[in-house]
Image: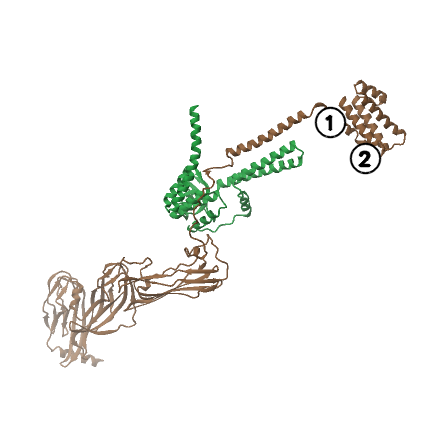
Amino acid sequence: MKKLILLSFSILLLLPAGLMAQKELFEAGNRAYQAEDFVKAISIYDSVLQSGKQSAALHYNLANSYFKEGNIGKSILHYEKALKLKPQDAEIQNNLEIARQKTIDRFEEVPENLFQASRLAIISLLSPDNWARVALFALLLATIGFALYLFSQYLRLGFISIIGGLSITLLALILAWSHQNYLNNNQGIILLEDSSYVKSAPSESADDVFILHEGTKALRLEQFENWSKIKLPDGKLGWLLSEEIAVI
Amino acid sequence: MKQLSFYIALFISFNSLAQVSFTVSVASKNVQQGQRFAVEFKVNQRGESFQAPDFTGFSVLGGPNTSVSTYMDNSGTRFNLTYSYILQANNLGKFTIGPAYIKTGGQTYRTESIDITVSEKKEAAQQNAKNEDLILKALVSKQSVYQGEPIYARYRLYFRTEIGQQTFREEPNFKGFYRENIDDKRIETSEEYINGQRYVAADLQKMVLIPQQSGELKPGNIGLNVPIRINSGRRDFFGFPITRTSTEELNADFPTIEVKPLPDKGRPDNFSGAVGRYDFKVSLSNTEISTDESITLRLEINGTGNIKLVDIPQPEFPQAFEVFDPEITERSNVGSYGMKGSKVIEYLLVPRYGGTYKIDPIAFSYFNPQSKSYETISSNSYEIKVKGGQVSPNLAGQAQMGGNEKEEVNFISKEILFIKTKAGRWLKNDDRFWLSQGFWGSLALLLLINLGLYFFWTKENNKRANPSALREQKAAKKAAKRLKNAKKALDQNQAAEFYQALLEALWGYFSDKLKMPAHEQSRERLLEELAMRGLSSPTQIRLEKIIEQAEMTRYTQATMVNAQNDYQEASAILTEIEGEL
């Protein structure tokens, strides 16, 4: 019993302590950045990430530090991660664009076909998590409608709520599933090596198809042993060693 | 014809009276091993049974070749018969060519025996020095130069005898040099004195050499074959000197060139190997254009030095311009000054977008061997105004030629924005709601709520709906069903049909309910039966009254006055009976 009390006490103490720690570390990192000690700032921000916590601002600041250090690949990686958490943030978009201008590879983006593009546009309206939240909210609506239908005089309103709520729930669940599926099969990756030969097959001895440079963004379609099959914005396909890339 | 032969015979007989001379001659008594030389035996009378010596120690390459000549001089007609052999000296040492014999006029004559000394083969150059009629020299303008600095070189032949067409037997390989010959249409000659001797000098070959590597470079040996006339010291029939042609083999060493590497100190970054003295000019055809025009950027390098090997600096253009393949014009001359000329490169630029763009200064660096230092010429920077057209968008996908200018031009900062000072919402690294425990929990909770609602509702319903109420409800429904036709007639205001239907409904109901056959149907029997089944008396009275009233309308004029009331009364009674029974 005594132990239990002690344990719960220590949990109570640790919980805010952990929260404090990452906030303080974040601010310490910011001070290092302000003092132009970017290497220190990177190590501090990284330690927060290592502790299993992240935020859009943390990734953004880390990306800024990498940029100042001249590590464009990692800088772009963390801007992309920040943007993933906060897609509408203007600062992140701006800095990502500047970092991208430092990269070497340029691509003509091939237009996807209209059906695929519109499907992608629809499933990408919300993240899978938010689609899931929409589904649950709609289910809540349907539940309220059911209650109204059963226990009140507002039969019509209740009925509409049930039908509408259920169909939105179903739709949102399908979209959440599709989006997650798309993300799983099209993981954004950033090349971290200075330059890297893309092979025609997952093997060292395979032919070189083309060469990519640091900071290039691509999609990972599949993985085989320690190789990743990637797709470039212009539609080119090839294999890269998984250790040379990082997933956004 | 007979006469002519007679005269010839006469001459010969006359000559035969003269003193017989039979001599041997060699070009030189000192020969080198392997050298070819001729041995001639001459007799001034017609002879026969010529017997050559055995040329021990020599190999006979040719002969005997005989030649006969007759000529006249003051002393009369002379006759010469020559037997010649071409020999080659094989072994070292002193060899004797023994006497040769010939019979003439019945007498046998013999030649002297001569000693030939065969010496070791000497260097050609040394032998060359012996012949002072011909001197070959390779002359260079400088023997110590910087790498890339042109040298003027020529092969000069000095001669004081008549020479024929020369041919090069051997030429230097000029390893490590870039070589360009100077082609002269004709060879000019001049007079020069060497060791007090007057020579005619001619430059056989002139060239410009540019060393491509540093160190002591030895281009090699020059070998020249010059045919010369050798005066035999005698004169021919008409008094001209008798000469023969011999080929002299001349040799000369090309001087060693000391090539100094270019100094590392002060070498500009953009230095690309130009050595000499240059002028660098950059011009732009126009600085204000509209988007549908083009401009030309012209770079010109002009000067003396290794112009052929000079690289023109590559300018950087703003990204908003389309740059076509440049046009390159080269012109160079070689001469005693070395090499001079110009290189011109012209770029055609077509703007894609409107705006103001900058072309950074273009710098050209060269090494000046005279001042022994690097010199750099920089052009001005140019500003180009492009009128009209849309302003260059900041396209990441565009080919980038102008480096960082596009950011300046497009007013897009190169510098990133400052960090965020507020951490915002903290998330766990792989915080995912979709398919997480929270998601499934919420889903299950909502479904459970629905299920709960349903169970709650059914339970409530059962509680609320007590048995009598339920029965009453059912009875009312049944009554309404029975009275359907009556209701229809009521709505149509047809009194007779209404009462008829009302009666039929009532009887129909009771015959079903009480299982009364049609022939037993009477009011008394009905009431009796109902009373037996325990129908309350007020209801009985009401039923009796309504039946009576309905039947009555059959026999009297049916009116609609009480129809509405009667319908409701019938409905109420039926409901009541259904509930009670």
Identify the residue at horizontal 10%, vertical 76% (top origin).
B19
Asked if marks 2 and 1 touch (Cβ < 8 Å), the reply is no
Residue B144 picture location, percent across and down: 23, 63
Residue B263 picture location, percent across and down: 26, 58
Distance (Cα) linking label 2 and label 1 = 24 Å
Q: Quadrant of residue A49?
A: top left
Q: Chain of mark 2?
A: B
- Which amino acid, by three-letter code, is at mark 1? Gln
Name which of mark 2 and mark 1 comes first in the sequence: 1
- Which amino acid, by three-letter code, is at mark 2? Asp
Rate crowding at label 2 as few (under 14), some (14 to 19) or many (20 or more) other CA atoms within 10 Å.
few
The residue pinned by badge 2 equals B491
Q: Is residue B186 left or right of residue B456?
A: left
The residue pinned by badge 1 equals B473
Q: Chain of mark 1?
A: B
Kind of element beneath mark 1: helix
Q: Quadrant of residue B364?
A: bottom left
Kind of element beneath mark 2: helix
Q: Residue B268 or B169: which is nearer the viewer?
A: B268
Residue A173 picture location, percent across and down: 55, 37
Q: Which mark is residue B98?
A: none
Residue B500 picture location, percent across and down: 85, 30
Output the letter for the chain in brown: B
The N terminus of chain B lies in which quarter of the figure? bottom left
Kindly tell me whether residue A207 is visible in this rendering.
Answer: no
Q: Colour of chain A?
A: green
Q: Residue B524 or A123: which is nearer the viewer?
A: B524
Rate crowding at label 1 as few (under 14), some (14 to 19) or many (20 or more) other CA atoms within 10 Å.
some
Q: Residue A4 or A79: which is nearer the viewer?
A: A4
Placement of A4 over or under B281, stated as above or below: above
